[in-house]
Amino acid sequence: MLPGAVAVLVSASLLLPGAAPADGPAPRPLPDRMADTGGGTQLITAVAPDTGSTTGTVTWWDREGGADGRWVRAGSAPARFGAGGLADGATRVQGTNTTPTGLYDLPYAFGIAAAPRGTAYRYRPVREDSWWCQDNASRSYNRWAEPRPADCRAAEAEHLITYPRQYAHALVVGFNYDRPVRGRGAGIFLHVNGDGATAGCVSVPAEAMRRVLRWADPREHPHIAIGTSGGTTAVTRL
């Protein structure tokens, strides 16, 4: 993640197939309406209707023709967000079950299941001793830990293998990752749906997650932008 801030212009109609204004030209693709897309030629947008929502849409995009080309939708799927809705990533508080808004990189993928055929991302297999540390007092805060270090309490960490459905496949979202701020939050992923809203991650159906992993190419520097469709939404790039 890089310092700075971006403003994302999001229109709910842009995420609905076939939706267009009653008169005038169709709106530009969502990434073209964003002030910053991370500088790559792939982008994932995760958009909720408002900050209190727990559902929305994830769409993944390719920029055809390089940096000066046009954005084309490669796929989309229904999404789930945190049980507490969405919160500004710059001021989010850990333990609030909110999904952080912002523009983030995607450091690597992981999963309990094998990587889908064609996955180009570095894919870390989940083992019996794989944990994600969320203990604010630990030197491993907001990091994969294998095995769990002594200074990371089990009650303050996720034992990844105990979530076979959600973590069958996942991408790490670079929220609070490069220079972690204690108390802001840890363990934010794009992963497979569970039974309902998440604890702060973004989730999609299993087949959509597999499609995203087959599509994502680290050479294209993909990012994920999380925000709402309430017109102009300021999101913080950490």
Image (cartoon, rainbow, N blue to C red):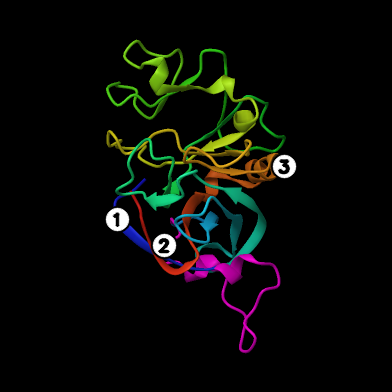
Label placed on residue 174? none
Tell me the distance, in whole angstroms, between the alpha carbons under discs 1 and 2. 10 Å
Left or right: 60 in relation to 227: right
* Label located before the other in sequence (3 or 2): 2
Circles 1 and 2 in contact, beta carbons < 8 Å: yes
Q: In screen coordinates, is 149 left or right of 12?
A: left
Three-letter code, disc 3: Glu
Q: Which residue lies under the disc numbered 2? A: 36
Main secondary-structure element of the magenta-colored stretch: loop
Measuring from the top left, give residue 13's x and y in whole percent.
60, 71
Cα distance between the residues tagged 3 and 1: 34 Å
Q: Which residues are magenta?
A: 12-38
Choose the circle earlier in sequence order: 3 or 1: 1
* Residue highlighted by disc 1: 4
Does dot 3 land on a helix, a strand or a loop? helix
Q: Quadrant of residue 73?
A: bottom right
Q: Quarter-wise, where is residue 119 in the image?
A: top right
Q: 196 or 112: nearer the eye?
A: 196
Q: Which residue is mark 3?
A: 207
Residue at 38% x, 27% y is 134
Relative to 156, 208 lies left or right = right
x and y, in percent, of residue 20 in the image:
64, 78
Name the residue type under label 1: Gly
Could you tell me if residue 41 is visible in this image? Answer: no
